[in-house]
Amino acid sequence: MQDEDGFDAFYAASAPRLVRHVYLATGDLGRAQDCVQEAYVRAWRRWDDLRAEDVDAVAWVRTVAWRLAVNDWRRGLAQLKALVRHGPVPDVPAPSPDVVAVRAALETLPRDQRAALVLHYFSGLRVREIADLLGVAEGTVKARLSRGRTALAPLLRNDEEDPSWTRS
């Protein structure tokens, strides 16, 4: 069983100082807190081993937090290099009113029906593929598709523009 009291005291005594150290190195308080927190999570998982091996736990956590911060810095540098090499991501146009309406209508459906409809109509999967993916019977997928279409029809009907657009 882990020594929770010992870990809690260790954390309370050392965490603020380690956050300050990583913050001073990174210049980003939120990132420093995340790195130190992740280091403490890893220490918690190994707490019995760290205590049994008589390891300097503060040094261990500091090393892990520092490595996490360096990895973040390297990842950011790689992203910066990619940005310089490829340029900024082009602006994505706003969704059309139709897409917004479909999304809003889908949000009103139960999650299972919404998943079946999106997988079938937007991802192009067949009923058998959806059944395998979701781990349900094909009949269940067919029922979800039918119920979903029935629920969506009145929400998406636009009789003024084109009365023939609805699917039977």
Image (spheres, rainbow, N blue to C red):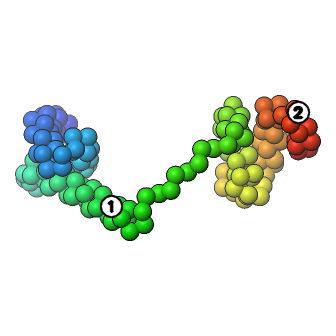
Q: Amino acid at mark 2?
A: Asp
User: Residue at coordinates 67% horizontally, 43% vertically from top-left?
Assistant: 96
Q: Which mark is residue 159?
A: 2
Q: Is residue 81 above or below residue 105?
A: below
User: Nearest the camera: 36 or 52?
Assistant: 36
Q: Seen in the image, is 97 located left or right of residue 14?
A: right
Query: Horizontal and vertical percent for residue 157?
Result: 83, 34
- Mark 1 residue crowding within 10 angstroms, few (<14) / some (14–19) / many (20+): few
Classify the position of the N terminus by image quarter: top left
Label 2 sits on a secondary structure element that is loop
How far, Cα to Cα, is label 1 from label 2? 50 Å
Q: Can residue 110 be seen here?
A: no
Query: Horizontal and vertical percent for residue 19?
Result: 16, 41
User: Residue at coordinates 12% horizontally, 45% vertically from top-left?
Assistant: 24
Label 1 sits on a secondary structure element that is helix
Query: Horizontal and vertical percent for residue 62?
Result: 13, 51
Query: Horizontal and vertical percent for residue 70?
Result: 21, 58
Q: Earlier in the sequence, mark 1 or mark 2?
A: 1
Residue at numbered disc 1: 80
User: Residue at coordinates 88% horizontally, 33% vertically from top-left?
Assistant: 159
Q: Amino acid at mark 1?
A: Leu
Classify the position of the C terminus by image quarter: top right
